Amino acid sequence: MRFLKIALASGVICLSLSAAAQTSAVGNCKPTLPSYPTIQQAVNAVTAGSLIEVCPGPYPEQVVVNKNVTLKGIAAANQGAAIITSPAGGLVQNTASLATGNPIAAQLLVQAPATAVTITNITVDGNNSQIATCGLNPIGIYFQNASGTITRVAVLNSTPSPGFEGCQTGLGIFAQSGGGGGSVVTISSNHVEGYAKNGITGNEGGTNVTITGNSVIGVGPTTGAAQNSIQIGFGAAGNITKNTVGSDVWSPDNIGDPGDAAAGILVYASAGVNITSNNVSDTQFGIAVVSDPNFGNANNSLVTKNTVSATHIFDGIDLCSNGNTVNTNIVNGSDEAGIHVDDSCTGSATGNQVTKNTINSACAGILIGPGATGNTTAPNTYYNVVTQRLDNATQCSPPARPSKKGSRHATVRAARP
């Protein structure tokens, strides 16, 4: 900060002038700009509001951003990938969860007081994290009580070392609030793959995430963690629109297991979430909207114009909550119900409006739990459905498909670092 003294007849007035924002570079591809060898050195050196252009190449570091800057990967010499990789010694703890206090090793950590950080055209690759413990959670990009935009980024391999995939850790992109702070983050047009637990996650009250136009792809059948491509949970708010997600299958799961199923899109103990125009395939639950009496309700969400395909063991859309509007969805190929109005989370499910959906190939078109009352479940259109609708069902057991007790329902496993 510089100060300018102006002498007037009545005295001296001091005016503060902020140093001007600037454009700087990381690497050697922009010789006309102030340049730095590492991303962290550039972040430390520039003033708030600056643009940092990151030249192609690997950057083996963990970066902490606590001011408003733009990190932008650029192309040079026919190369276009600026990649934040694991340091030679592996990832180490650089923060802790605002909810649980558990240790976190973030590759790109954005913290308060930053309120307008943009990250674009950068790859974050957690391969070789060297985290051989369940006590440290690797995260690709973590907005912690901070706000901004993540766009056209690739986040890959957010995972502990081989053999520790079952730790329920490893998040691609994570936004979280706590201690009275907030995180408002737009996450758009990114590719997230190779995560161990969740692809994109927004947790805790004070967090509001707009998750749109991303591809988020799990590892397929795995005995490690029960994966979720996208999660909004524990009081966070947001919108989940126009994403392509799937390949979330926890392979040890079976029809009688009481928990740990994987989901393409999970809303967990967060109310009023908008889930629109997503394409979900090859999961155990396609879309799950789940209340938890210990953490809060997931009521009053909008689930519309989504296409859900190939849900294994369980349901295309699961409504374990109240007051949701579910319409104009296409659900193809559900081992259990196309849509389940599910009373198993809190003992009741009421006020759900399930109409104008098209369900093709399912055990039950709509399955209504024995404690679910006061719901609207017509009109809907059914094709190749063993039973169009089961009210107060105790069992859904078509030929060559697993049976499932309506009162014993497998649940998803949410991530809460």
Image: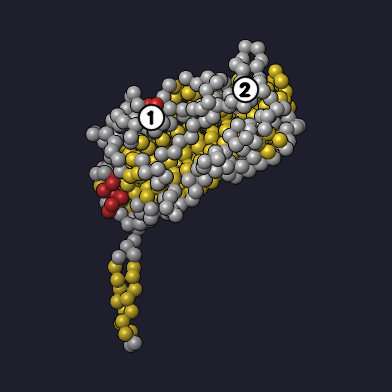
Query: Which amino acid, mark 2?
Result: Lys
Q: Secondary structure at mark 1?
A: helix
Question: Total marks drawn?
Answer: 2
Dot 2: few (<14), some (14–19), or many (≥20) neighbours within 10 Å?
Answer: some
Name the foreground residue: 72 vs 33: 72
Query: Is disc 2 placed on a helix, strand or loop?
Result: loop
Residue 324 in the image: state x and y as whole percent: 65, 40
- Please identify, in this view, whether the residue under mark 2 or under mark 1 is nearer the observer: 2
Q: In the rendering, at what x and y percent does residue 162 appear?
A: 33, 24
Which residue corresponds to the image point at 43% horizontal and 41% vertical from the top-left?
174
- Whether residue 55 is visible to the viewer of this picture, yes or no, is no
Q: Residue furthest right?
A: 379
Q: Quadrant of residue 378?
A: top right
User: Would you say 237 lies left or right of 383 here?
Assistant: left
Which class describes the residues within 10 Å of circle 1: few (<14), some (14-19), or many (20+)?
some
Q: Earlier in the sequence, mark 2 or mark 1?
A: 1
Is residue 43 visible in this depiction of the protein? yes
Please state if 123 lies on the left or on the right of 230 as rendered.
Answer: left
Would residue 293 appear left or right of 252 to someone viewing this image?
right
Residue 111 percent coordinates (x, y): 37, 50
Quadrant in the picture for the C terminus: top left
Which disc, if any, is residue 353? none
Seen at 38% across and 26% down, the residue is: 165
Name the residue beneath numbered marker 1.
167
Colouring method of the image? secondary structure
Q: Which residue is mark 2?
A: 405
| Front residue of 255 and 76 | 255
For residue 371, which quarter of the picture? top right
Quarter of the N terminus within the rendering: bottom left
Q: State the residue at coordinates (40%, 46%).
A: 98
**171 w.r.t. 315: above or below:** below
